[in-house]
Image: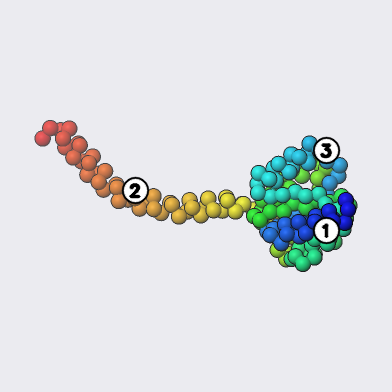
Amino acid sequence: MDRGQKTEAVSALNVTLKDAGVVVVTRNLGMSVAQSTDLRTKMRDAGASFKVTKNRLAKLALEGTEYGPIADMLTGPVALATSDDPVAAAKIAVEFAKTNDRLEIVGGAMGDTLLDEAGVKSLASMPSLDELRGTIVGLLQAPATKIARVLVEPAGSLARVVGAYAATGE
């Protein structure tokens, strides 16, 4: 990698980090290409990204972002998982680490809040932004459904009374 490629890689990573809602630092303990591809696919499907990078370049990219404190976690073969949704990257990384002992969660950050391994795992247990939106929509629709049912019920009762009266033939 020449100097121009390194500069380009640092600036691209810097832009990614500035837009990220969460950054999860993982340690690669010898994952195969197939395992890495599987993890990247899962991340992409969830709206996150997974980038293996050189530690020195990642530290340069962290400058000027709110994720500067995670520079101390960048030792050994690391990769950064990022996403706009504060839960997506953490959730996919933690789920993948449960089934694959070659990926280790080191820590991360959400905004200027530094997270250790336990913090990332607790973040992963929270519902995602889409799940929260679905819950809110369900809560908002429930009262409207109940109001409609209450308004329709008297007419239904009246129809049953008329039907029963007609059935008696009087």
* Disc 2 versus disc 1: nearer the observer: 1
Tell me the amino acid under the disc marked 3. Ser
Image quadrant containing the C terminus = top left
Is label 3 in a helix, a strand or a loop? loop
Residue 151 point in image, percent of width and height: 30, 51
Which residue in the protein does label 2 denote? 149
The 10 Å Cα crowd at callout 1, few under 14, some 14 to 19, many 20 or more, is some
Color encoding of the figure: rainbow
Residue at 43%, 51% in the rendered image: 142
Q: Is residue 126 visible?
A: yes
N-term-proximal mark, 2 vs 3: 3
Which residue in the protein does label 3 denote? 32
Residue 134 point in image, percent of width and height: 53, 50
User: Compared with residue 26, is residue 34 higher up or lower down, i.e. above or below?
Assistant: above
Residue at 75%, 48% in the rendered image: 50
Residue 71 point in image, percent of width and height: 83, 61
Tell me the amino acid under the disc marked 1. Thr
How far apart marks 2 and 1 lie (CA) works out to 63 Å
Is label 1 in a helix, a strand or a loop? helix
The answer to the question of whether label 2 and label 1 lie on touching residues, with beta carbons closer than 8 A, is no
Which residue in the protein does label 1 denote? 7
Residue at 78%, 53% in the rendered image: 80
